[in-house]
Image (tube, grey):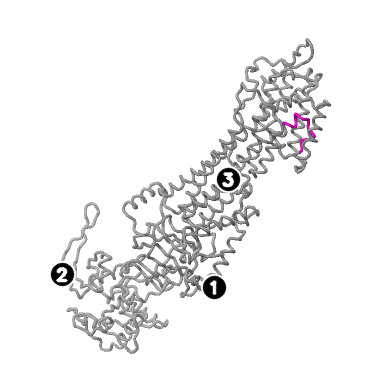
Amino acid sequence: MEMLYPVALTIAPCWPTLTLRPVSSSLRSSLATQRESGRRQMMQPIQQPDGAIKWETECRRNVAPWECPLLLADMWRPKDGFERRFEIQRKEDYEREEREREREGESYQGVRWRRSRMSSGGAAEEGERGHRGRNSELRRSISDMNLSLRRRQGNHVTNDPRGGGSRPANNNGAVQDRKNIVSMINPLQGEIRASKAEAKVGWTHQQPEEEKDYSSCDLEMMSQSLILPPTDRPYFLLLQGYDQSKDFVLYIMAGHTHVFGRKPTMREREKDKERERKGKKPLKVDTFLSAPDLLARHLLVRRDSAVPETPTGRALIRPFRGGGVTHNGVALYRETVLNPGDIIGLGNHFLFLYRDPRVTPAPPLALTLPWHSDGSHPCCSSGLADKQEALRHYLGSTESVLKFHPRHADGLLQEILSKNSSPDSGGGPLAPAYLLSIMIDHASKCLDPALTPQILLKAANQIKEIVWDNIKEFGDKHPTQNSSEPEIEISTANVQKLSSDLRPLMFWMSNATELLNFFQVKVEVMEKEWEFEAPGDPVLTADMDTCSEALAQLDDVIMHTFQQCVYHLTKTLYSLLPALLDTNPFSSEEKEKGKAGAQGVEGEEKGEEEVDDVSALPAKVAGLVEVYRSSLILSREACLSPPLTSQTFGYLFFFTNTSLLNTLLERDGLFSWSRAVQIRTNLDLVLDWLQGAGLGDIASEFMKKLSVIVNFLCIPKTRLIQSSWNSLQEDHALLSPAQLHHLLTHYKLGPSRAPPVSWAPPPGTELSGDIFESFLDHPPLILPNETPRLDLSQPVPSSDLLKEVTRLRTFLWGLDQDELPANQRTRL
């Protein structure tokens, strides 16, 4: 039976006996310019007892340089994703298949071209190439491309055993092909280049100077210069590199994420392995660049499925922390949109043009660089006028924006806090929080990420110092009284004086709360931006520690100002609360005092809302309510957040409930129906006023037990006598058995009248508990964690704040002008 070797064996039928060894990349890159030598061996596999295979050499011979063993070894190695296959077919079947293909319209040259591509390890036909497509030629070796180039020329150049080159009989086509290829590099009219065989002769014979350059143009090198960009995926075109021997012209973005970086050091590799063992796998670098100022992971590019929130075809770029990156000439610190035609700079050496052929219509290649487009001459009158107009627009803008240079951050921070540190500064109740927020917002969006944690900590520390000074000053005005000193009667004027002195503390409690909410949002955004960074990076860990310290400082400010406010307010309440138990609201004397008090404060309270009016209350009850009223006005003026306002009044009502309840249980002389009705009336007057002021729900919750005891004492005597222990305990479940027993045993039924037997508790009832409430059971202070009320996406909220923002913009502009020579300054 007559046989024919398949197409994969037509080049070298004896190759199954040829041992091919791996070729290093440096040796492979010099195949076109160095002589090659080697050894050809025939080897026999021998099975070992352990299952391994050992190759034993049977015979061998030297391989001449003209046989190019390294070139053939590189060509014969299959490409990624492919394997070699050897087949034996009948000659008649092979010829019949060739004739059928010719009848289908394929020429013999086309069949031969496909056969040569298969033999050199290329991709399959166009429809079978998958994601590689026609771009698989970009991944072909030098030898593969050279072989394909020779076959496109007709395979007319042959090598003799002595390594000399012979001219083909008819080489017009080959010479013309080579002429066209060379002309793409340096075209000259009417010039015909020498063939590669002639070039080899030219290396040993002296040629004229003008012919040396062209004769030394290796066809392999020229074939690489004819690479076409892909049409199905984005790529990066190198505009400026660092090392010509290592940089490529195109960097294709094969996946949906692409990381630029440099080769990691041994220490960096160990860190990555350690993170992988902990389950924190770092991102894989796709493109290694050679510049020394690049990080191991320098830039991340994401597109398509990696950024599902963006439209198809849009890409995002994100520099890794500490990596110098520019986007269209502007320093880039955070993730931003990458559009086709944008210029990306990495470090001080690399510039890339980003292209995405899928975007239609694609932007032209010839783009004006953004940093050139606005490069009007500063000395030109039109450019100066435009600059002045832009400056005027910015200074008068109502946008919540405050731009500054990093070197001016400390000066701006000091200017904000020194001019807005009190409620009377003129910027409004939330001026410090608002101004610091727009300052930090600009830093977090436009400046180096390392600056934001530092600003947060410096701002928190300076605020804490200011608050500590205010607390000390307040303590000097309102020292804690010793028990030996006589108590001073608290009047309405004293309450208002206390409220006025508490304004700075309430002012900073409100601003610190807003800043805490704003800082927490910024820290969460920073953590989200760092999700692509190397886990456990010491720089990021230090930044997080800095942010945590800043938040802790603001926590201290809020807690200390809260403690100072409620302490001095409750100290004032302590002197006024007994009046609620002793005042008879039905007496004519109290009614006259109430009318006189109403006339005395009529002028002062004229501007207050009707709900805040206390003139209808008895005088002593009005003095107690005045503390609540002043506290409410104080929180409203400071724009204290609703959660913190509720907790402030919750503490005041907790103190009111505990103090009155303990005093009532102490004074058993009040355990009668007539006195209970007076207490119930006074308590209802207070609760009704609090309900009208919007504090009724909080008051009812914290003063519930006091109301239960007063309601118990208000039960008519005849019905109370008929009640039993079990029914009373069931109706007043909030009272402990000890408290209920104390009330029943000390209740005033009348002279020489003993308590009924039905009031006796059942045997075994625990009555040894404390009847008094503890002040240590107060509700804990829960720092608010809510959305900041300051919306920086809206214009500046008030005219007072706008004046302060404009002043700070002018202040920063003055700092910039002072650093410039006199002839370069801009005048308004």
Residue 590 position, x and y percent, is 80, 27
Instruction: Tell whether position 614 is magenta.
Output: yes
Q: For the residues marked 1 and 3, what is the alpha-carbon distance in whole angstroms? A: 43 Å
Q: For the residues marked 3 and 2, what is the alpha-carbon distance in whole angstroms? A: 93 Å
Residue tagged 3:
421
Residues rendered magenta in the picture: 613-623
Residue 693 position, x and y percent, is 73, 39
Q: Is residue 502 above or below residue 404?
A: above
Residue tagged 2:
61
Q: Earlier in the sequence, mark 1 or mark 2?
A: 2
Farthest residue in the front direction? 822
Q: Is residue 758 visible?
A: yes
Amino acid type, residue under disc 3 in the picture = Ser
Q: Secondary structure at mark 3?
A: loop
Q: Earlier in the sequence, mark 3 or mark 2?
A: 2
Amino acid type, residue under disc 1 in the picture = Ser
Q: Quadrant of residue 597?
A: top right
Q: Residues within 10 Å of mark 3 (few under 14, many from 20)?
A: some
Q: Residues within 10 Å of mark 1 (few under 14, many from 20)?
A: few
Q: Nearer the viewer, residue 657 or 463?
A: 463
Q: Is residue 48 left or right of residue 546?
A: left
Q: Nearer the viewer, residue 491 or 576?
A: 491
